[in-house]
Amino acid sequence: MSATAARLVVLVPLAAAVLGLLLARRHDASDGRGGLDPRAARGLAVTASLVTLGAALVQLVGVHTSGQSRAVDTFAPLAAGELRIPLQLQATTATALIALVVAVVGWAVQAFAGWYLREDDRYGIFAATVSLFTAAMLLVVESADLVLTLVGWEVMGWCSYLLIGHWSRKESARRAALKAFLVTRLADVGFVLGVVVLATEAGSTAYRSVIASYAGESATLPMVLLVIGVLGKSGMVPFHDWLPDAMEGPTPASALIHAATMVAAGTFVLAQLFDLLASSDGARWVLALSTAVTMVWAALLAFGQSDLKRLLAYSTLSQVALMLSALAVAQADEGPGAGVLHLYSHAFFKALLFLAIGWLSVTVGGTAAATMRGGLRGHLVLRPAMFVGLLSLAGVPPLVGFVSKEHVLSAAEAGIAVAPARSWLVLLAGLVTVVLTAAYCMRAWLVLDDLTAADIDRHESDTATRPVQTAVVVLTVLTVIGGLVVLSPLVDLGGHIGWFVALLSVLLVVGAGLAVVRVTTSRLGAGEDPALLVGARQRAFDSGFGVDRLYVALVATPVLAAARLVVFLDREVVDAYVRGAAVGAVLAGRGGDRAHRTERAATGLAWVVAGAVAVTLVGVALL
């Protein structure tokens, strides 16, 4: 049963994507309208997501009750010379659990998108792309083979380009999609090379064979390459600038990309190969340095954003950095459980926050902080949902965000005994991030729940359909109980929460929140946006402190200059020889033609006849 469920988890959203795209194209051709009938597209997408959710739940129950992991065949194994490619999936407690999390988020996003994009003329295409994106992420999760992982990895990258650029009539959306595609493609070069090196050494692409082939040996080179690919997909420094710009896509796309799919996929891939990562100090240092810088940098930028959707985007960078940092410091005998647990919890509360912000933006007419000021008033579902989501993001006990964050910090604390420099770096960066996260969460709440804002006339019943409200409620409940009831017993965490660090982080959260309130009230007055404390520098926060211009100066400009040089050499040097030979041939042909045309036909014929006569006479004389 679990084997069949594992296949269905991937095949159902894939079938929904293919069918949705075919129906959308057929609808376009038949009546010229912009896509599949929204009701049919919504029914197909939501139904498929519910079936996927059911299959994921069946798989989890089957694997967990049996207590056994198993390989699941897909196609016949492939052989490329000495390389074996088994193309198998795996059914384990860890993969089944994250598949269930992805399925929950996928269902919530599809339910929300059916309402949020109800008037979009390309909604059918969007829903089909979300299904394909979900199938690709689930393939990465369920894969027991590097080739299948790579297929899912690349399909996710392609789908992210389509989802970010869904509103392609906007130049900013097209630019953001292209930026995301180019940056992640560049980093993916490392991922592909890492897969090639691992498979070449093992003679197989199966995870078990790859890990076994490096027993007792360091896999520094391939793991550094894989880490580079993961940093790009996850938006870590120096590949981070594409992710905030991805907010140009519709909010459902943002929730999907930022919650449990693409940006978190690298965490699970590295967790699958944790034995190799643990033996590679070089790869772990690269991971630790990038994540430590990213979590602090992104949390700082989040506080000063003038747009609350971009605030959530930067918080994603910071939280993904936190989950990846756990893999950089976790001891080999403890395993990757702390990072994986934060992946689970982040999926719930970040999907909740994005959907809540999207819902509220429809009500108030935008996601700018000034527009959303006081917007939560009167919302019986949204207000508690946003409150719970922000508390979990800030790491307030006993919510799921607190449980997973403390496991990460405790993993860093425990790692000090083995790798002190790397562990101290992650631990200190994590504690600074705790303060900054609490600060921007408090800022967001003060803006959204501002009681001094002018009255806004709205009615709860006019804002969202029942499926949307159900999705938000489910995510809220999972955020509240997830860490204590659902997740912890199912995840092999290896370590435990260090209560000294936990107490310290709780005090930092409370202190940071109270400081924001007090400083804002004393300097700006009640009801003001705490981000105004940064003053005229808020524009710099919005621009990411000029990193985009730095990309242009250090990357785009040299690349364009190199491209122009290549074009010049191709046209003026390489092509010059070809053109020269062509000109020479033309001139020679014209000269020969002119020489031939200057002779008279009769004269030429006379010479031929004379030659023939002379040959004849010589022959007769010799006889």
Image: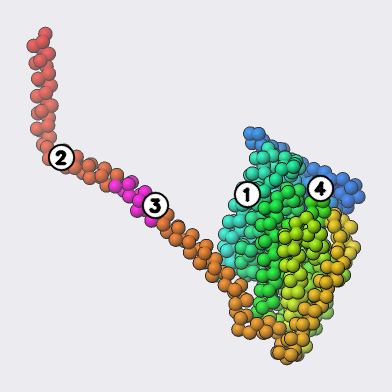
Verify CB contact (< 8 Å) between mark 1 and mark 3. no
Residue at position x 79%, y 54% from top? 331
Instruction: Report which residue position mark 3 lands on.
Output: 570
Q: How far apart are labels 1 and 4 at the CA level?
A: 25 Å
Q: Is residue 482 something one can see in this rendering?
A: no
Q: Quadrant of the C terminus?
A: top left
Q: Quadrant of residue 474?
A: bottom right
Q: Given the image, on which type of amino acid does mark 3 rest?
A: Asp
In the displayed structure, 353 sits above or below 8; it is: below
Q: Secondary structure at mark 4?
A: strand
Of badges 3 and 4, nearer the viewer stands 3
Of badges 2 and 3, nearer the viewer stands 3
Verify CB contact (< 8 Å) between mark 2 and mark 3. no
Q: Is residue 172 magenta?
A: no
Q: How far apart are labels 1 and 3 at the CA level?
A: 29 Å
- Closer to the chain start, of discs 1 and 3, is 1
In the displayed structure, 104 sits above or below 3; it is: below
Of badges 4 and 2, nearer the viewer stands 4
Residue 91: mark in rendering: 4
Verify CB contact (< 8 Å) between mark 3 and mark 4. no
The stretch of residues the image draws in magenta is 568-580
Instruction: Report which residue position mark 1 lands on.
Output: 192
Q: Secondary structure at mark 1?
A: helix
**Which color scheme does this rendered protein use?**
rainbow
Residue 445: mark in rendering: none
Q: Quadrant of residue 434?
A: bottom right
Q: Is residue 584 left or right of residue 491?
A: left
Residue 115 spot, x, y in % from top left: 73, 70
For the stretch drawn in magenta, the main secondary structure is: helix
Instruction: Report which residue position mark 2 lands on.
Output: 595
Q: How far apart are labels 4 and 2 at the CA level?
A: 83 Å
